[in-house]
Image (cartoon, helix red, strand yellow):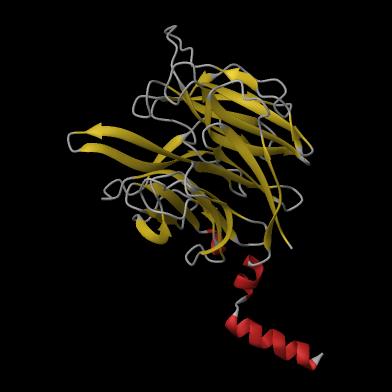
Amino acid sequence: MKLLTSVLFILSIFFPVSLLAQMNLVKISEIMVYDTPPFKECHASSIVEVSENKFLIAAFGGSREGKDDVSIWLSRSNGNQWEPPELIDTGLASDHELYPCWNPVLFQSQSGILSLFYKVGPSPREWWGMVKTSDDQGKIWSNGVRLPQDILGPIKNKPVQLSDGTILSPSSTETTTAEGLSWKAHIEKSTDDGKSWIKISIDHQTPFDVIQPSILVLEDQRLQILCRSRNNSVMQAFSEDNGDSWSTITRTDLPNPNSGTDALTLSNGYHLLVYNPTVRGRNGRSKLSVALSKTGNDWSEVLSLENQKRGEFSYPAVVESSNGEIHISYTYNRKNIKHVVLEFK
């Protein structure tokens, strides 16, 4: 016993506890969501657990991103198998014009209301936010409702609900200015279970172009966002007042090839990020990895999901299930969505 104690003490010096935990994260399953996709291309998946071992994945699919036939599709799992996707909504607008759909986000609040947020419009510079809701775990959905002006809903990644019931939705805008394209991140906050929202800016004077934030809950209830950027790095900002105000945006040490990421705080206290560990270039989305951090500052890449010379493996979405497993969905060459399950062993 003394020898074992001594060995563990030595290991704790050279291999901190966080690193030992990181080395135990393993892949336990992977499967394509669609057997025979009813569309030519698909992208931007979102995943949610609606009850124990029951999951939904939403994605947009059609002939090609940005085309008018791109719609929102929903798939259901029963155990380890995915049922054929069903069409949830098209981009048919109130003006009777058909527009492409974009970036669905699934979120189930503490009250049990399931929301499907998505965007409709000719481009990310002109789109508007939409939402459908369900009170039976996604079997029956309400009609799509347009969100209020200046409220877009979560742009790519899921909202976070705080202990007091406040919902923080990570969002962003892409606008064209006299200087060119401008990307800005912001938070949309609801204190009435998504019935109404207010917009909170995040460092809109930043010289960095950032979109598609995800939210982490740090120690002492501080919050951190991690953002996609056009600056070859994952960017970050912090809040010490439950998301009502935010610090300036700064670089992390994590590379980013101008591609979406997703992150969450796990029940064991660690923070997990799924990202492309590369910079901008021809093969920037051909690698997809998982990183862990105990603090939100020091990240270690611990698992490779994809590492190929060519291809696109991108736009991950990640949730922790009720049994502690980590479920990740991501775009697989724009032809399918891949579902991967990880666990600590």
254 lies above or below 118: below
Compare residues 196 and 202 and report the one nearer the observer: 202
When asked about the image quadrant of residue 144, the answer is: top right
Q: Quadrant of the C terminus?
A: bottom right
Q: Residue at x 50, y 59 (%)?
A: 222
When asked about the image quadrant of residue 53, the answer is: top right
**Left or right position of 75 against 271:** right
Q: Is residue 286 visible?
A: yes
Relative image position of residue 239 (x, y in whole percent):
44, 55
Q: Residue at x 42, y 49 (%)?
A: 227
Q: Quadrant of the N terminus?
A: bottom right
Relative image position of residue 199 (x, y in whole percent):
41, 37
> Looking at this rendering, what residue extends furthest in the right direction?
1
Compare residues 80 and 88 and report the one nearer the observer: 80
Relative image position of residue 145 (x, y in whole percent):
53, 19
Compare residues 84 and 56 and report the one nearer the observer: 84
**Left or right position of 57 against 60:** right
Q: Residue at x 70, y 24 (%)?
A: 84
Q: Is residue 106 visible?
A: no
20 lies above or below 47: below
